[in-house]
Amino acid sequence: MEEAERELRLLPQHPIPVDDRSPWGLTVNIPPLELQRIMAAYIIRRLLIAIPIMFGITILIFVFVALAPGDAVDAYLRPEQAGDAALRAAITHALGLDQPLPIRYLDWLAATLQGNLGFAALTGEPVNAIVWRGLLASGSLMLTALAIGIVIGIPIGALGALRQYSKLDSGITAFAFLGISTPSFLAALGGLYLFGVLFPIFPVGGMQAAAVPFTIPDFLAHLTLPALILGFGYVAQFSRYTRSSMLEVISQLYITTAVSKGLPSRTVVVRHAFRNALIPVVTIIGLSLPSIIGGAAVTEYVFAWPGLGWAVINAANQRDFPTIMGISLCFAVVVLIANLLTDVTYALIDPRIRY
Amino acid sequence: MAMLGLVVIAILVAGALAASESGAYTQDLANHELPPSLAHWFGTDSLGRDVFARTLLGGRVSLAVGLVSVIFSTVIGVVVGALAGYYRRLDFVIMRVVDVIMSFPQFVLLLLLAAFIGPGLLNIMVLIAVLTWTVPCRLIRGQFLSLREADYVVAARVIGVRDRLIVVRHILPNAIAPLLVYMSLGVASNVILEATLSFIGLGVQPPTPSWGNLLNTAHSITVLTEQPWQWVPAAILIVLFVLAVNFVGDGIRDALDARSTVERA
C-alpha cells in the first residue's frame, strides 16, 4: 500500500470550491457539456487500453494452464480407464489438445469472444452458468460488505481524526490496527464461531436453507453474518485511511481560514474538510478493489457461500481447468470495470480534475 | 510501540528456532484429541501429535516462508525496478507487465498458480515472490526516476562512469529507505498469504505444519467448537505476529519519513 500512502500525500493544496446549492456542500459535480465530451473520450480511451490488458491476461491464464504438470485428459477419464492409450488418444484429439499451443489459444479465445466459456471438466456443466450463478452470489455479498465498510468506516475514521488522541480515537485506531492485522479467514472463522455456534443467532453457511424454495428473508438472514464479517474488515481499513486523510486536511491553511472566518464547525468539517479528505480515500478504495475480491473469496470458502471465490477455490482444488479459466477471466473483467468506475467517481467528486 | 513489537517478534522467532522436529511429527494414536495438560501443553490433534510442538514448528515454517519470499520478491523487484527506472524504453514495457499483474486480484492469481504448479514449501515461497515483486519494483522505480536527475548522478554520467557502477554505488544506497518499510510490512502480508493458502489446502502440505495448516483443521465444526486447543494458538500467534510487524513497520516509517507525522500512535 505504499503507493496508496503516497497518494495521500498528493492531497490538493487548494480546497475544492464549495457548492452553495446544497446545504451540506456535498453535491455531485455534473460537468458542463464540453467537459462531458472530454470525459467520454477519456472513458473510451481507457476502455481501448483495457483491451490489450485483457488479452495479456488471457494469454497469462492460458499459458499457465497449458504449462501445468499432469495431463488435462485425466480429469475426463475414470480411474480404470487411465491406462487405455487408445481412449486417451481419442479424447485428446476430441478435445483438440494435440494441436500446437497458439492454435489452442486462438480457438479458446474465439470461443470465449462468442460467449462460450467451455464446460467444467468434472460435471460437464457449462462454465457460463457457473460464472453467472457465482457472479450474482458474490456480487450481493461484496456489495453489501463494501456498503457496510463505506457507511460505517468513513464516518468513524473522520470522527477519530476530529477527536484526535481522545479515548474514542485510541479505540478506533486500536480496532483498525487489529482489523488489518487479522487475516480474513481468521475473522471469518472467529465470526462463525461466535455468532453461529456460541450464540446461534445467524444461520451457519450457505446462501439459503436447504431444500426450501428461495425467499428473500431467508437469503438476507444467511447474508448477514458473512457480509458483517467481511464488512468489518473494510471498516478497519477505510477508517484508517480516512483518519490519516482527515488529519492531513485539517492541518491545511484553508481550514484555519474557515474557522477564523467564524463558520460553524459543522460547516467547516463537512463542507471543507470532509470533501477534500474524500479524494484520496476514493483512490485507495479503488486501488484495493482487487484485493477486496480476493478477500471475499476466502470468506466465501469459510461460509460455503456459493459465489465466484468459493467456485474458483473448489475448481483449483480439483484442477478443473476450464472453470478456473472462465472464472479468472470474469475476475479480471470485474477488476477493470471497477477501476474505470473509480476514475469516473473521482471526476464526479472533484470538479478540478481535467482529462 | 515499535519496541514492543520488536520484543514480540524476537520472542516468536526464538520460539520458532527452538522448535523440535521430532516432537511435531511423532504420532500417538492412543492419545489423540486430548485437551491441554502438563504432558502436552496445547493438547494433541487428531493423530495424537503434540499441538504445542506443531505450533512452534509451524511458526518456523510460516516465518521462513514470509522472510524468504520477501527476500526473493525484493531481489526481483529491485532488479526490474532499477532497470525500469534507469532505462526509459524498458520502462514502458515493464510497466505494462506490472499493470497486467497488478490488475488481477492477487489472491486469485496465487490460487491459480498454486493449482497449476502444485503445493509445497519451496513452490509457495517462489509463488508468493513472483506475485508480490511488483510492489518493490514500483517503489524502486519511483526512487530511481527522481534520483536519476540528481546532480551527482548526472556528474557521474558526464564523467563516463559505467551504468552499472552508477546504479550500484550511487543511486541504490539512496533508494533503499522505503524498501526497508516494504520488507518489514511485506513479511507480515506474506505470512498472511501463506496462511490463507495453507488454510485452503493449496499451501504447505501436511505433515509439515504451518500456522495456516493448523487452522485448516478448524474447518470441521467438531474441531471448531469442541477442540479449540488445536487451532486457537496458531490463530493468536498469527495475529500477534502481524500486529507486531505492523508496529515495527510503522515505527520504521515514522523514523525515516519526517513528513509522515500523521500516525503517531
Image (cartoon, helix red, strand yellow):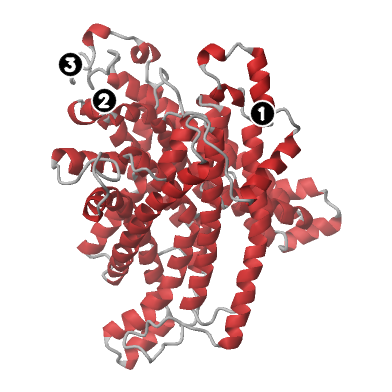
Vertical side of B28 occupied by B231: above or below: below
Residue displayed at 67% across by 15% down: A86
Q: Amino acid at mark 2?
A: Gln
Helix, strand or loop at mark 3:
loop
Q: Are marks 2 and 3 on the same chain?
A: yes
Q: Nearer the viewer, residue A248 or A238?
A: A238
A331 left or right of B146 in image: left
Q: Which residue is mark 1?
A: A94
Query: Image height check: is A337 above or below A44?
Result: above
Q: Which of the numbered marks, if any, corresponds to residue A327?
A: none
Q: Quadrant of residue A307?
A: top left
Three-letter code for the amino acid on which mark 1 is drawn: Ala
Marks 1/2: CA–CA distance: 49 Å
Q: Are marks 2 and 3 in contact (CB under 8 Å)?
A: no
Q: Could you say whether the residue bearing mark 2 is in a helix, strand or loop?
A: helix
Total marks shown come to 3
Foreground residue, A75 or B254? A75
Q: Nearer the viewer, residue A326 or B126?
A: A326
- Label 3 to label 1, Cα distance in Å? 63 Å
Q: Which residue is mark 2?
A: B230
The answer to which of marks 2 and 3 sits earlier in the sequence is 3
Q: Which residue is mark 3?
A: B38
